[in-house]
């Protein structure tokens, strides 16, 4: 695509401009020579006629060169506009892709924040080592831990949906981050399950 959009027409434009510049320079040289010819002699008159014939030829060449340059400029403009259209369309795709990535990353950060909130709330239930729950406290704490487990399960479901979206967008790094967070939340849920089953002390329930 690069050669199609740039090379052939840039060469044509360069050639047209160079030839026109050379022809104009030739006109200037002939003009100076004609100005200096002594036309009072037969030899000078004949020389002047030859120079003027050459001047006329280069004049025609300059006129043709101007037309060729205008055509080359027109062609170059068309190609430049096509190139701009390609870049503009690509820019739209880049913008859409960037917005998708930002949206997915925002969702991930929101889930990370939610996990932190839940684990911070879980930490408030931690009992000092050696201090057991009373019979009156235990049902209430178990109920709260079950609620935390439900909240974490909801987070895991949201992370699964997010991972699917990240995979569709080929965001490998985000997929790995989601997997790591999911493993951490799964570990926290296993601890909660052990506590609610009565196999682990509540002091160990923090993720």
Image (cartoon, grey):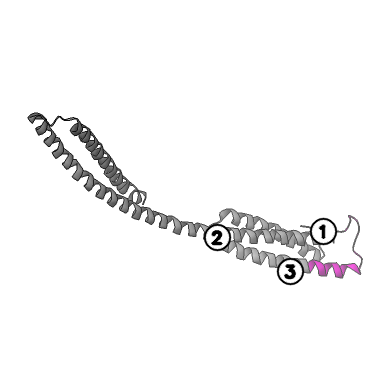
**On screen, residue 29 above or below 99:** above
Q: Position of residue 16 (x, y in %)?
A: 27, 44
Spatial CA span between label 1 and label 2: 33 Å
Q: Earlier in the sequence, mark 1 or mark 2?
A: 1
Does the segment drawn in magenta span residue 143?
A: yes
Give the residue at mark 1.
123
Residue at the (70%, 57%) spot, across then down: 184
Q: Earlier in the sequence, mark 2 or mark 3?
A: 3
Give the residue at mark 2.
167
Describe the element under mark 3 as helix, strand or loop.
Answer: helix
Does the segment drawn in magenta span residue 145?
A: yes
Question: Which residue is situated farthest in the front direction here?
Answer: 40
Q: Dividing the image into 4 quarters, which one contains the C terminus?
A: bottom right
Say if residue 201 shows up in the picture: no
Report if the CB atoms under discs 1 and 3 are less than 8 Å apart. Answer: no
Q: Position of residue 93 (x, y in %)?
A: 48, 59
Give the foreground label among 2 and 3.
Answer: 2
Report if the CB atoms under discs 1 and 2 are less than 8 Å apart. Answer: no
Residue at the (34%, 55%) spot, across then down: 78
Spatial CA span between label 1 and label 3: 16 Å
The residue stretch that appears in magenta: 126-146
Packing grade of label 2 (10 A; few <14, some 14-19, many >=20) is: some
Give the residue at mark 3.
150
Residue at the (7%, 30%) spot, across then down: 42
Q: Earlier in the sequence, mark 1 or mark 3?
A: 1
Spatial CA span between label 2 and label 3: 26 Å
Say if residue 127 shows up in the picture: yes
Report if the CB atoms under discs 2 and 3 are less than 8 Å apart. Answer: no
Q: Position of residue 187 (x, y in %)?
A: 72, 58
Q: Is residue 139 left or right of residue 29?
A: right
Q: Between residues 120 and 12, which one lies in front from this camera angle?
A: 12
Describe the element under mark 1 as helix, strand or loop.
Answer: helix
């Amino acid at each position: 695509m690069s050669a199609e959009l740039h090379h052939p027409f840039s060469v044509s434009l360069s050639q047209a401009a160079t030839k026109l510049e050379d022809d104009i320079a030739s006109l200037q040289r002939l003009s100076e020579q004609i100005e200096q010819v002594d036309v009072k002699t037969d030899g000078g008159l004949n020389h002047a006629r030859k120079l003027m014939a050459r001047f006329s030829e280069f004049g025609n060449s300059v006129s043709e060169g101007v037309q060729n340059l205008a055509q080359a400029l027109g062609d170059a403009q068309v190609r430049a506009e096509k190139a701009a259209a390609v870049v503009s369309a690509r820019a739209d795709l880049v913008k859409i892709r960037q917005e998708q990535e930002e949206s997915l990353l925002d969702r991930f950060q929101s889930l990370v924040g939610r996990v932190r909130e839940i684990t911070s709330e879980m930490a408030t239930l931690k009992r000092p080592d050696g201090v057991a729950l009373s019979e009156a406290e235990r049902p209430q704490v178990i109920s709260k831990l079950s609620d935390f487990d439900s909240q974490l399960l909801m987070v895991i479901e949201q992370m699964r949906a997010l991972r699917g979206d990240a995979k569709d967008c080929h965001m490998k790094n985000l997929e790995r981050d989601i997997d790591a967070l999911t493993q951490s939340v799964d570990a926290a849920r296993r601890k909660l399950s052990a506590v609610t089953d009565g196999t682990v002390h509540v002091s160990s329930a923090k993720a």
